[in-house]
Amino acid sequence: MSEKKRVLIMGAAGRDFHNFNTYFRGNKNYEVVAFTAEQIPGIEGRMYPKELAGEGYEKGIPIHAEADLPKLIKELKVDECILAYSDLHHQDVMKKASLVLANGADFKLMGPEFTMIKSTKPVISVCAVRTGVGKSQTTRAVVDELKKLGKKAVVIRHPMPYGDLVKQAVQRYGAVEDLDKHECTIEEREEYETHIELGNILYAGVDYEKIIREAEKEADVILWDGGNNDYSFYKTDLHFTLVDPHRPGHELSYYPGTANVMMADVCLIAKCNTAEKKNIDEVTTNIKALNPKAQIVNVDSVITCEKSNELKGKKVLVVEDGPTLTHGEMKYGAGTIAAKEAGAIIVDPKEYAVGSILETFKKHPHLDALLPAMGYGAQQIKDLEETINKIPCDYVLSGTPIDLTKVLKVNKPLVRVKYDYKDNGEMAKIIGDFVKTHFK
């Protein structure tokens, strides 16, 4: 019998662990010798624990920085490198492939069929071409329509396992207290808090086979809430993909977002109320070229701002959703739009940034006159708080979905900006047809 192939999985603490759990764990033809980490700070230097890795991994699996990839391929005698994270330009995917090939290993992408888990309940997936397109507000809208029809949706969120992976294997969120119980980061709170406030049940974690089996016990419908522009972890009965007219052309050029467009039953062109018509037309043309069978729906993102009438002429610090600005590469978000509409003066935070927030600005030079709500750990949250409190302004205008005052002590008035899904009744009809089909 031939020797096991030695595999390294390139990831960001999400898709990489899922690929391992669903395909490589217990597979006698492979040995996963390492993970590498990219995109998310503070992931490398840890272990994927033996309790989750299973037989043959008595010491767990080490997680290294992806910057060490050439050295790791040689030292660990790697046969195959599996790319297992998302929101990468197609050109960057091939740069990584070239690096792997040049150092003597095969480079592979895993198709959805190898890692998608079949549910006993109908599954709806909300995915996107880029991070920060508006998945969360869309997921809330889908839950709303299902509730109106008497169906209970349980949301399963793409993983963000940044803490103790054994404790985080299966997480259920049904109350605000669960956010503290599971020691959630700001990034996790941004995705979970609003669902909890609306009375929705949400699951997340590391082992998505176990997660869905728990969720099925209390769900009529499973609703996959995707992260970045990744595709679903579950076999899907209704696939939504959001496309962003603020980033026209990205639907053609980002991995695996382009695949999401091609797989979609419905493509939602998001934020149409704040996008230029020529950009909406461009993404519409591109969707039709990629997936002629997909239904296309134009969607608004309705922005509401507390105390907007008080902001005219005032100096404001705009805080936006972190991942949208960093690896999502957006130059603005809902907070910036609200500030401009209110006639506020936007303060540039860069000269006041400290610690990891300063490093974020150095790593992402496209960021200008706004502050990403970075909070992947206690120190970064502390750096964010110190940065905010150093900045001379009249108001903090928060475009992140959560109430920052629950995790930070802010020394100036904080005004929240919220955004919600709106269409012309298309979602109600789509979900109505879905329920008729699956609940006869």
Image: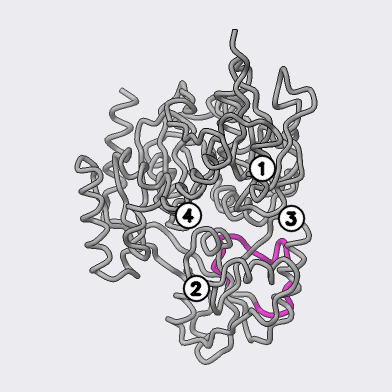
Tell me the amino acid under the disc marked 4: Thr
Which residue, given by chain and number where applicable, does mark 4 sit on?
A: 131
Sequence-wise first label, 3 or 1:
1
Looking at the image, is mark 1 or mark 2 nearer the viewer? 1
Tell me the amino acid under the disc marked 2: Cys
Q: Disc 4 to disc 2, how far (Cα)?
A: 23 Å
Image coordinates of residue 129 in percent, x first then y, are 39, 51
* Residue at the image point whose x is 58% and y is 29% from the top: 79
Tell me the amino acid under the disc marked 1: Pro
Looking at the rendering, the stretch of residues picked out in magenta corresponds to: 398-413
Q: Which disc, if any, is residue 377?
A: 3
Q: Residue furthest top?
A: 1
* Residue at the image point whose x is 62% and y is 65% from the top: 373
Relative to 315, does residue 232 appear above or below in the rendering?
A: above
Q: Secondary structure at mark 2?
A: strand
Q: Which disc, if any, is residue 305?
A: 2
Sequence-wise first label, 1 or 4:
4
* Residue at the image point whose x is 55% and y is 28% from the top: 212
Sequence-wise first label, 3 or 4:
4
* Residue at the image point whose x is 61% and y is 66% from the top: 363
Q: Nearer the viewer, residue 118 or 348?
A: 348
Looking at the image, is mark 4 or mark 2 nearer the viewer? 4
